[in-house]
């Protein structure tokens, strides 16, 4: 039996309760990826590719969370998955993944703020970015003035609102499909479910590949539960619970609404960006709001849009938490600026200053080509998410192989063990590799009227590569993979060692 290593001491207090963590597991990562960018993916790829991509990537993310639960409960260390990359893959790759995660969520914050601006302009397209952005940033700062406990309480409320808005949407779409909406005067043949017969797959292979960009963004943030567990009172217990809850969340809060969206929303290709001499752009509307609006239902679209703004604010809030904690953790290991490792009243103040500084990039929305920032940040976040999930699964595979090489077992009933084993991790790695390749291939031949630059899909890979190679050069460490026999797994159980010695002796005889 492997004895888990003691968690690293970072100074962060364990103030998040099991109840708070469970609600965060249910709704933490639901944000702009699901509530806004699915409309673009549906317009480009069609309803079938969207559902297929969400199913494949969702299944792989579930496997990843089970793997993270196994690693976190048996080897509880602060820093979560990139610490596992250091231990089970290599220090250089762990360094790259740590900074990849930090850079990812540092840029997700302005992305989510830009999306909030877009959704808020649903009511008044002329409202100034210079008015909305400071309001949203100030609200995020207020939450962090109260610490991790109040962050968790805020996420509980936000999580409940997310579940409510998705439930409302599913019920409303069922009524639309059943023709029980008096305001919906469209003929039955004009309902979007007829699109499944005529254009379930739009734009062929490029359209199918394109949807993996939005899918990679939509599931992003699920792994941040591994970071949050470091400030929970019972990190082992909650990670085991969270890895089981993720399957239900993916089915009910992702796959079901995506299916219903493809059945009721009639959406054409998004309009092209503004001309060079035009300083205005048409704001994107959440496809969930648009689907209800097309049925002519009064008031409900406004209510849903308001809740969606709150939901996206929640994701921005969670992104600040993830990036600041990740930056503090890698800085505490000597992998980042020293001032980012310091805590002030149990808060990573230096890291928070860095994150909020980058949030000012959201003012780019006010520029003439500000909507291009949306596409760049979407591509960056999606690519970084695929790399993060890929790394977690590879770490679990090498952990299992190291246990076998060093003749260890994980049989403590108090710890969690992924039911998918190595085979499931290999499958997930294949799905993530395909998703990342699909995103790059789609950018090279995009069916959008205003295609994103191909470089935007490579930027996430470039960030990881620069940090990976830079670490090896600076530290003169060319280790690509830590030998399985040298991976640290903790002290061996003396009873098991004695039993194995007897079995080896009998086998030799």
Image (cartoon, rainbow, N blue to C red):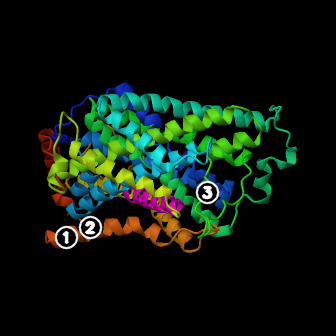
Determine the secondary structure under disc 1.
helix
Badge 3 crowding class, 10 Å Cα cut-off, few under 14, some 14 to 19, many 20 or more, is many
The quarter of the rendered structure image containing the N terminus is top left
Residue identifier under label 2: 468
Q: Residue at x 20, y 34 (%)?
A: 346
**Disc 3 to disc 2, C-alpha distance:** 32 Å
Nearer the camera: disc 3 or disc 2: 3
Is 324 or 507 nearer to us in this picture?
324
Q: Position of residue 497 (x, y in %)?
A: 14, 45
User: Which residue in the protein does label 3 denote?
Assistant: 41
Q: Quadrant of residue 85?
A: bottom left
Q: Is residue 258 magenta?
A: no
Count of numbered marks = 3
Q: Nearer the viewer, residue 259 or 481?
A: 259
Cα distance between the residues tagged 2 and 1: 7 Å
Relative horizontal placement of residue 68, taking residue 492 as reference (left or right): right
Q: In the visual, does 329 lie left or right of 261? A: left
Region of the chain picked out in magenta, as a range: 370-389
Disc 3 or 2, which lies upstream in sequence? 3
Would you identify the image quadrant in which residue 170 lies? Answer: top right
Q: Earlier in the sequence, mark 3 or mark 1?
A: 3
Residue 470 position in % (x across, y down): 22, 70
Relative to 222, say whether 310 is above or below: above
Residue name at image x 25 percent, y 71 percent: 469
Q: Which mark is residue 472?
A: 1
Residue 47 appears in view? yes
Task: Name the side, left or right, on which 298 lies relative to 406.
Answer: right
Pointer 3 and pointer 2: residues touching (CB < 8 Å)? no
Query: Percent x, y for residue 260?
Result: 68, 43
């Amino acid at each position: 039996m492997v004895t888990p290593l003691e968690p690293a001491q970072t100074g962060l207090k364990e103030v998040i309760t099991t109840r708070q963590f469970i609600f965060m597991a249910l709704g933490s990562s639901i944000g702009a990826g699901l509530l806004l960018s699915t409309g673009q993916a549906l317009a480009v790829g069609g309803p079938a590719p969207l559902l297929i991509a969400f199913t494949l990537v969702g299944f792989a993310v579930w496997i990843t969370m089970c793997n993270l639960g196994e690693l976190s409960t048996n080897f509880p260390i602060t820093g979560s998955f990139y610490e596992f990359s250091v231990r089970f893959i290599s220090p250089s790759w762990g360094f790259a993944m740590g900074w990849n995660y930090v850079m990812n969520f540092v840029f997700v914050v302005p992305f989510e703020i830009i999306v909030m601006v877009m959704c808020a302009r649903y009511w008044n397209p002329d409202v100034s970015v210079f008015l909305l952005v400071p309001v949203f940033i100030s609200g995020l700062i207020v939450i962090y003035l109260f610490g991790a406990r109040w962050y968790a309480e805020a996420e509980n409320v936000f999580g409940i609102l997310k579940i409510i808005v998705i439930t409302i949407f599913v019920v409303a779409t069922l009524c639309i499909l059943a023709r029980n909406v008096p305001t919906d005067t469209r003929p039955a043949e004009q309902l979007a479910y007829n699109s499944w017969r005529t254009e379930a797959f739009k734009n062929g292979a490029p359209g199918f590949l394109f949807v993996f960009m939005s899918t990679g963004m939509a599931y992003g943030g699920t792994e941040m539960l591994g970071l949050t567990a470091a400030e929970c009172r019972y990190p082992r217990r909650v990670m085991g619970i969270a890895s089981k809850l993720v399957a239900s969340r993916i089915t009910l809060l992702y796959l079901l609404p995506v299916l219903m969206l493809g059945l009721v929303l009639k959406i054409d290709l998004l309009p092209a960006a503004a001309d060079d001499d035009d300083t205005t752009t048409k704001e994107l509307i959440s496809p969930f709001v648009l689907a209800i609006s097309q049925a002519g239902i009064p008031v409900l679209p406004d209510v849903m849009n308001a809740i969606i703004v709150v939901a996206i604010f929640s994701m921005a809030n969670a992104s600040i938490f993830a990036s600041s904690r990740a930056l503090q953790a890698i800085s505490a290991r000597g992998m980042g600026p020293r001032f980012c490792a310091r805590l002030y009243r149990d808060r990573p103040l230096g890291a928070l200053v860095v994150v909020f500084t980058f949030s000012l990039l959201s003012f780019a929305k006010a520029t003439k080509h500000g909507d291009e920032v949306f596409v760049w940040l979407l591509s960056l976040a999606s690519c970084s998410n695929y790399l993060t999930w890929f790394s977690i699964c590879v770490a679990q595979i090498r952990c299992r192989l190291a246990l076998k090489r060093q003749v260890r077992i994980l049989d403590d009933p108090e710890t969690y063990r992924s039911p998918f084993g190595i085979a499931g991790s290999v499958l997930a790695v294949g799905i993530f590799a395909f998703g990342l390749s699909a995103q790059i291939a789609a950018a090279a031949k995009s069916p959008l009227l205003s295609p994103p630059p191909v470089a935007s899909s490579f930027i996430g890979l470039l960030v990881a590569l620069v940090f990976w190679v830079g670490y090896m050069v600076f530290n003169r460490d060319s280790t690509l993979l830590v030998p399985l026999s040298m991976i640290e797994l903790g002290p061996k159980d003396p009873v098991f060692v004695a039993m194995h010695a007897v079995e080896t002796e009998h086998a030799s005889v």
